[in-house]
Amino acid sequence: MLVEVELQVKEEIVRLVKAKFIRPARYVEWLSNIVPVKKKTGAIRICVNFRNLNLATPKDEYPMPMADLLVDGVAKHEILSFMDGHSDYNQIFIAEEDVHNTAFRCLGSIGTFEYVVMPFGLKNIGVTYQRAMNAIFHDMIGPNLEVYIDDVVIKSASGSSHLDDLRSPLRECSGIN
């Protein structure tokens, strides 16, 4: 059983390296352990236990949106479109001087790696992503859009304007003018 898990962890590490989400670590100051978790499909997901790093990390007090105000913000609109980010946190790079803090060790001789993009499990991941989304959509939030971390709602006062209201944030995300 342990050999099977180790092989699946190695496959997942190879996938993450190819995706450029992680890289081999050389000189580590923090070293976290992985927790292999079996998904419903039988595949292994690698979770990193960042508990000690999170204890040493100051809390980012960036103000998060309040859910009841977000609901109020969409209440009187005729049509809504809901979007959810895909691999969202993995699109934000970690500052090079902080990458070494995300080091983790794998089972057996697989090695030690570090994240170059934001992984799940870090203390301030939600507020960091919210700050990025607010910066990206700053001029659209309120009139046509509400955002909570990786959940985006495009709202339109009428069905006839909804396609135009959808185009603007989609262009912003894709970089198309």
Image (cartoon, rainbow, N blue to C red):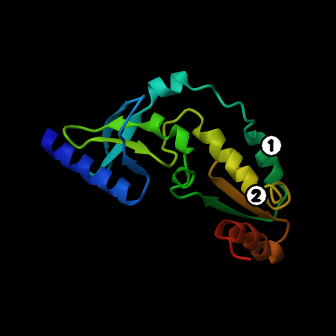
The answer to which quarter of the image holds residue 2 is: top left
x and y, in percent, of residue 53 in the image = 48, 27
- Which of the 4 quarters of the picture holds residue 48? top left
Q: Is residue 113 above or below residue 74?
A: above
**Is residue 165 something one can see in this rendering?**
yes
Identify residue for label 1. Answer: 69
Crowd rating for badge 1 (residues with CA inside 10 Å; few <14, some 14–19, many 20+): few
Q: Residue at x 40, y 37 (%)?
A: 103
Split into 4 quadrants, where in the image is the C terminus?
A: bottom right
Label 2 sits on residue: 137
Answer few, some or many: residues within 10 Å of disc 2's Cα (few below 14, many 20 plus, some between 14 and 19).
some
Figure quadrant of residue 144: bottom right
Asked whether the residues under the numbered discs 1 and 2 touch, taking CB atoms below 8 Å apart as contact, a structural biologist would say no
Q: Is residue 69 left or right of residue 91?
A: right
Left or right, residue 114 beside residue 75? left
Image depth: mark 1 or mark 2 in front: 2
